Amino acid sequence: MKGSQDNVKVLKKLVMNWVNHPLFERKDGRKDQLLNLDEHAHAKKNKQYKEIEDMSAKLKEFVADNKELLMTPETPPATWDNYLKYIDGIVLDGLVKTIAVS
């Protein structure tokens, strides 16, 4: 059980890293300015997408590890479904916050 809790903590930390790096920045860093969509911004966005894709592979590994740690033949399938909804909520929250800081 401890291993699965550690995995969730790492998962949350990975997702929250997204929040620290907006996908798009505003010109001159001011909130009243338009989004900066030049070539540099496009390259930065692509780099961040790649980082998110790489992290998603790690997240899948954590979920697979937790399935091995938590699931037994006696565990009802609904329990695992609820766990996946919990993990989805963490990831969704991170993505929404990432978009919100842009």
Image (spheres, rainbow, N blue to C red):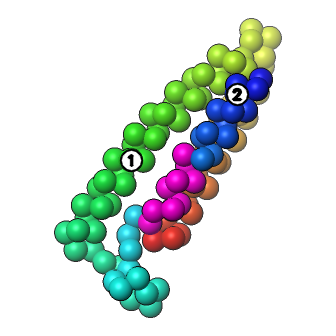
- Label 1: state its secondary structure: helix
Q: Which residue is mark 1?
A: 51
Please name the residue shown 73% across and 20% down the image.
70
Please name the residue shown 38% across and 74% down the image.
25
Please name the residue shown 67% across and 40% down the image.
9
In the image, the segment drawn in magenta is: 14-22
Q: Position of residue 56 (x, y in %)?
A: 46, 39
Most common secondary structure along the magenta stretch: helix
Please name the residue shown 24% across and 61% down the image.
43
Q: Quadrant of the C terminus?
A: bottom left
Can residue 40 be seen here? yes
Mark 2 neighbour density, 10 Å: few (under 14) some (14–19) many (20 or more)? some
Sequence-first disc among 1 and 2: 2
Q: Position of residue 14 (x, y in %)?
A: 54, 46
Tell which of 41 and 83 is nearer to you.
Answer: 41
- Label 2: state its secondary structure: helix
The amino acid marked with disc number 2 is Ser
Q: Residue furthest top?
A: 73
The image quadrant of residue 65 is: top right
Q: CA distance from mark 1 to mark 2?
A: 23 Å
The amino acid marked with disc number 1 is Glu
Tell which of 95 and 47 is nearer to you.
Answer: 47
Q: Which residue is mark 2?
A: 4
